[in-house]
Image (tube, rainbow, N blue to C red):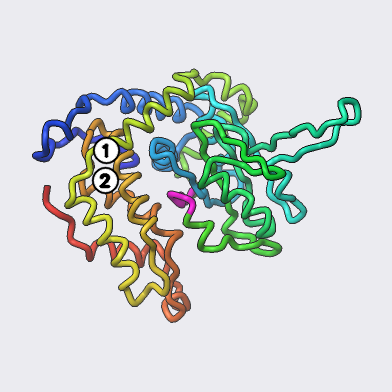
Amino acid sequence: MNEFSHETSPPPPPQVAENEMSMPQELPAMKLFSAMRKELRKVFLGQDEVAGQVLAALLAGGHVLLEGKPGLGKTHLVLALAKTFGGAFSRIQFTPDLMPSDVTGFKLFDMKSQTFQLRTGPVFTNLLLADEINRAPAKTQASLLEVMQERQVTIDGESLQIGAPFMTLATQNPVEHEGTYPLPEAQLDRFIMKIVIDYPNESDEAAIVAMAAMTQQQDSLATLQVLCTPDDVIAAQKQTAAVVAMPEVVAYAVALTRATREARTISLGAGTRGAISLLRIGKALAVMNGRNFVTPDDVKSAALPVLRHRVQIAPEVAITGQQVDDILAVIIEGVPAPRM
C-alpha cells in the first residue's frame, strides 16, 4: 500500500520507554494535514500521491524538486498549499539573465533620504516556487543555497533571517534541455525529495479540463479554506521532529543509503544527508498516519523520492535505457527491513 496516497490504520506501537512515547496517539498534526490534503483535492485532481509527498516534505521542513512536463498544475499546487495555511507565496521564473540579487534582494540608494534602502527579494516568503530552476546560470542557482540551508540571506554583508515556515519548490522540465544549466550534485542534495509529476489518468484529466473551462484559476483557489496559520505549521513540524525513531529503523535508513554506494549499477551513491532525509520523511509519514513512531515501511515508502536525485547511474547501465527508479527499486528490495 502506498503510504503517500492512502491512510492506514496505525499498527501497535513498538516497545519503547514511556518518556519516548509521551506524544498523544492522536496527533494534532495528523488532523491538520489530513484536512489540508482534502482541500488540495478540490483543485489539484488526479495527483493525490504528489500532494501527499509535498505535504510530507512540508511537515519535515524540507525543500522539494518537482519534475514534470508543462501544464500539469505545479504552480496551482503551490498556490493552493499556501492558501490552506494562510502563508505568503512568491514565484521566480528562472531565466538565463536572472541575477542573484533578483532572488535575494538588494540595497538601493534613496536620493530623498540619502540612505541605502533594502529591497527584499522574493525569497522572503513562506512558499517559494522556483520555476524552471535549471534555466538560470550557476551563480544564480547558488544564491538559493544559503536560503535553503541556513534560512537566511546576506545582502551587503548583512545577514537577514527568513521567517518560518519556509519551503522552496523548484521545478524542472524533463523534456527541454537546450540552454539549461544542470543543477550540481551539491545543490540537488539540498532538496529533501525529488517528486515526479506524470499525466493524470483519463477520467481525472477530463475532470480537470471541465473544471478549468468553467472557472478561472483565481476563482477555483477562492473556494479553498484557510485551515490554520503559519505558526500552526511550525508547531506540526516540531511534533514531527519529536517522533520516535527506534535504532533498528535508523539502521535501516543508513543501510538503504549505503546500498546505493555499493551497487554496481550506481556510479555515485547517496550521502549521509540521504539517510537523514529518509528518516525525516519517514517521521512525516508516521505523523500523517497518526503514529508517533516510525516504521520500516515509512522509510521504505520514502526511499524513491528521497534517493532518486542523489544517485547517478553507471554509464554502462545508462546506455541500456534503464531508469533510475527501476534500479533503485531493485536496490531497495535487496535490503532486508527489520521486523518491529
Instruction: Give the image quarter of residue 217.
Output: top right
Q: Are marks 1 and 2 in contact (CB under 8 Å)?
A: yes
Residue 123: percent from the left, percent from the top? 62, 38
Residue 41: percent from the left, percent from the top? 44, 30
* 24 displayed left or right of 170: left
**Was residue 220 drawn as part of the magenta stretch in this picture?**
no
Residue type highlighted by circle 2:
Asp
Which quadrant of the figure contains the N terminus?
Answer: top left
Q: What span is colored magenta in the figure?
A: 190-197
Query: Is residue 48 visible in this depiction of the protein?
Result: no
Instruction: Give the image quarter of residue 242.
Output: top left
**Was residue 193 drawn as part of the magenta stretch in this picture?**
yes
* 34 displayed left or right of 336: right
What residue do we see at 28% from left, 60% from top?
256
SS state under label 1: helix
Residue 261: percent from the left, percent from the top? 34, 70
What residue do we see at 34% from left, 77% from top?
264
* Residue wearing tag 1: 286
* 189 displayed left or right of 9: right
* Residue wearing tag 2: 298
Q: Is residue 27 above or below residue 141?
A: above
Could you tell me what secondary structure mostly forms the magenta stretch?
strand
Q: Is residue 187 above or below residue 28?
A: below
Label 1 crowd (10 A; few <14 / some 14-19 / many >=20) = many
